[in-house]
Amino acid sequence: MKIAYFDCFSGASGDMILGSLIDAGLGLQRLKEELKKLRLPTVHIKVKRVLKAGLSATQVIVEGNEKRSHRNLKEILRIVERSGVDAEVKEKSTEIFRRIASVEAKIHQTLVEEIHFHELGGLDSIIDIVGAVWGLQHLGIEKIYVSKVNVGGGFVRCEHGILPVPAPATLSLMEGKAIYSSGVERELLTPTGAAILTTLGSHFGPIPSIAVERIGYGAGRDDLPHPNLLRLIIGTSEFAAGKENVVVIETNIDDMNPQFYDYLIERLLAMGVLDVFITPILMKKNRPGHLLTVICSPDRLPSITDFLLKETTTLGLRWHEDERVKADREITSLQTHYGKIRFKLARWEGRIVNISPEYEDCKRLALKKGVPMKNVFEEAKKSTAAFLRKRPIQSR
């Protein structure tokens, strides 16, 4: 499995992430061609080699003659949606922008739709985010790891005035992740950098076992006492395919309104847990109750336990570390008689072991075409069969 490890000893920003990808081998010309699909003629990227505390790195500068000072979330998303970039890049980029807008709205007590992106009208953020998402995809990165992040200290001046570092939005985006400050009074981790890393990253902590293939350094703008760089290490995971450590959290509940479980499950899934389920049980004094089980990555344990203690009636939780193996998964789109449907492919040891259509796509097409959903599923099966004739499924 090809993995990427972001070593954030001097924080991270959107342009530092993009710079580290280019420094690690992402073709600059190919990147520029892809970013042209955003149709932003007033904005372009400039790349140069710089030295930071004696270390060579790539610095990315977004330039333009944009006159607008800000754009709201709807305008930003419209630019991304109407662009010619890949559908998966659009989806991930949109998710990142929505996360930034969501935490900003909560902090400033306003609606998500009213949040505005500043700096070149937010166009530089589009370049950084879409470029990073596409770059990681283009380099074939399957899993992203992130170190403990140096956030800096002191204060930063922004549109809302003078704010403490890390900025409130940055801190909210890093909820449940390990951060620290080396004492440098500078904003080292930006909201854009935090949003990219926490949305795309699946593991946060020490560097994993990796066979190093490429190394890239993305330069920050300021010259600091330490190398103001983001280090990117790309290589092959030496772990057994599909194996990972997880935390299993459990609690028994017999005194909570069962209607609350829908809310709890929805919130937990939005927080990035791997799985959540409820099992009917019989508790002491023969009371019927529920066993709530949550499976998550170890770095999410603090935020999940905090959420459960605040949002449920439980008085305590238990958890244990475990291991699990899982098939590698990917999404592919196939054309059917009723339209395009996304399929989830499962691979084990490099071979396809399962393929299934996405329910939401089948539902959408059934409603749009006014046909029974079973008809859409039958068409999906036909497309699956044709697909597998070219790439046969592993026999069970």
Image: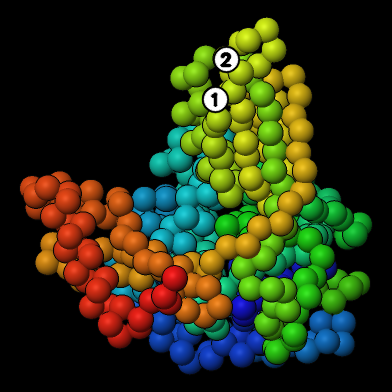
- Color theme of the render: rainbow
Question: Do the residues under discs 2 and 1 have CB atoms within 8 angstroms?
Answer: yes
Q: State the CA–CA distance, disc 2 to disc 1.
A: 7 Å
Residue shown at 53%/49% (left/top)? 99
Where residue 318 appears, as percent x and y from the top left, is 76, 33
Where residue 268 appears, as percent x and y from the top left, is 57, 38
Where residue 263 appears, as percent x and y from the top left, is 49, 28
Q: Quadrant of residue 8?
A: bottom right
Where residue 97 appears, as percent x and y from the top left, is 49, 55
Q: Nearer the viewer, residue 354 or 227?
A: 354
Residue reaching furthest to the left: 370
Decide if residue 113 is in sight here.
yes
Which residue is label 2 attached to? 288
Q: Is residue 297 above or below residue 251?
A: below
Question: Upstream in the sequence, badge 2 or badge 1?
Answer: 1
Residue reaching furthest to the front: 396
Which residue is label 1 attached to? 280
Residue shown at 75%/29% (left/top)? 317
The three-letter code of the residue at mark 2 reads: Pro
- The crowding category of the residue bearing disc 2, from other C-alpha atoms within 10 Å (few below 14, some 14 to 19, many at least 20), is few
Q: Quadrant of residue 385?
A: bottom left
Quarter holding the N terminus?
bottom right
The three-letter code of the residue at mark 1 reads: Pro
- 225 displayed left or right of 311: right
